[in-house]
Image (cartoon, rainbow, N blue to C red):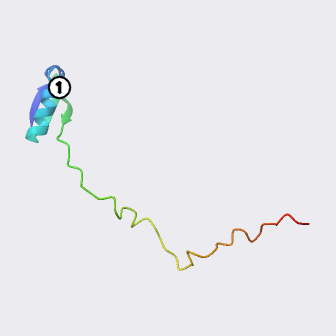
Amino acid sequence: MQEIAISKFKATCLAVLEDVRRTRRPIRVTRFGKPVAEILPASAAPNKSWLGCMSDVTELSDDDIVGPIGAFDNWKDGRP
């Protein structure tokens, strides 16, 4: 793995990041010879479609999903 001093990284940050993106090789940033950080190439995000994204979340029951739920059964109509 290529190493670069932190002072040189600070001066050439954008060029170093572009080099990592282009070559896909990581670079280790050091300070006084000791590792401080590693610059890794970004992993490619999966190209997933949003269609079907909730397929594992929902659950259907055997109840009637179209009929009334009975929410108004206990309401009073306001007459004495």
Of all residues shown, which one is farthest toward the right?
80
Answer yes or no: is residue 26 visible. no
Q: Is residue 48 left or right of residue 5?
A: right
- The answer to whether 78 appears left or right of 8 in the picture is right
The one nearer the camera, 36 or 44, is 44
73 shown above or below 3? below
At label 1, the amino acid type is Cys
Residue identified by numbered label 1: 13
The quarter of the picture where residue 15 lies is top left
| Residue 74: image location, x then y, percent | 77, 69
Name the quarter where the C terminus is drawn.
bottom right
What residue is shown at x 20% (from left), y 47% (from top)?
A: 43
Q: What quarter of the picture does the N terminus occupy?
A: top left
In this view of the protein, which residue sits in the foreground, 79 or 30? 79
Residue 67 sits above or below residue 38 on the image: below
Above/below status of 67 relative to 18? below
How packed mark 1 is, by other alpha carbons closer than 10 Å (few <14, some 14-19, many 20 or more), is few
Instruction: Residue 37: give x, y in percent of width and height.
Output: 21, 32
